[in-house]
Amino acid sequence: MPGTPTRVLIIDDEPAICKALSIGLARAGFYVKTALTGDEGIALIKKEPFDVLVLDLRVHDMRGDVIFELARAEQPNLAHTTLFVTGDISERADRLIRACGCPLLRKPFELRDLIGVLTAMMPRAKDASA
């Protein structure tokens, strides 16, 4: 539906990152929800649809690859519209990212870079970030 904001879920265990991204993306026209744990994020995914998942690979209660698999099982579109963010990449994480073909932003990153990746991932994001 034209004019509908891109729905973004951010799962990151750093409250400051969730808050900053939520404010920045909302100001850019995105609909944003945040979760500080994998369990909280999966609960949100079970309740409402999201266009994009911004996922930290290192969340305290659950590995990022597990969150990704659970998320895409609930919402198959997230298999190709997940943006991984991390400050540290393991060999396992690198294999996951290569296998799914989803983009990665290394922390720290700029908000404009995040918006640029979201825009490239989602045609509707072009309307939301204008």
Image (tube, grey):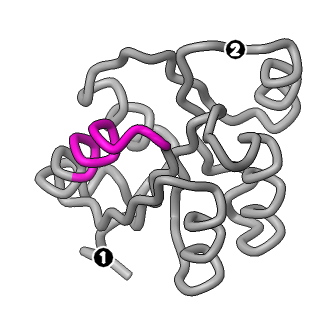
Q: Which residues are magenta?
A: 13-22
Q: Position of residue 43 (x, y in %)?
A: 61, 76
Q: Would residue 98 be found to the left or right of residue 18 on screen? A: right
| Residue that numbered label 1 is attached to | 4
User: Is residue 19 part of the magenta span, yes or no?
Assistant: yes
Nearer to me, 9 or 28: 9
Rendered image quadrant of residue 113: top left
The mark found on residue 71 in the picture is none
The Cα–Cα distance between marks 1 and 2, rounded to whole angstroms, is 34 Å
Which residue is depicted at the point 41% across and 67% down?
7
Q: Would residue 23 be found to the left or right of residue 8 on screen? A: left
Q: Could you say whether the residue bearing mark 1 is in a helix, strand or loop?
A: loop
Q: Would residue 92 be found to the left or right of residue 87 on screen? A: right
The mark found on residue 89 in the picture is 2
Which residue is depicted at the point 63% across and 41% down?
60
Rendered image quadrant of residue 58: top right
Q: Would residue 62 be found to the left or right of residue 124 on screen? A: right
Q: Could you say whether the residue bearing mark 2 is in a helix, strand or loop?
A: loop
Q: Nearer the viewer, mark 1 or mark 2?
A: 2
Name the kind of residue labelled 1 in the image.
Thr
Q: Is residue 110 above or below residue 74?
A: above
Q: Is residue 71 above or below residue 66?
A: below
Q: Position of residue 51 (x, y in %)?
A: 52, 64
Q: Position of residue 35 (x, y in %)?
A: 46, 59
Q: How many marks?
A: 2
Quadrant (top left, top right, bottom left, bottom right) of the N terminus? bottom left
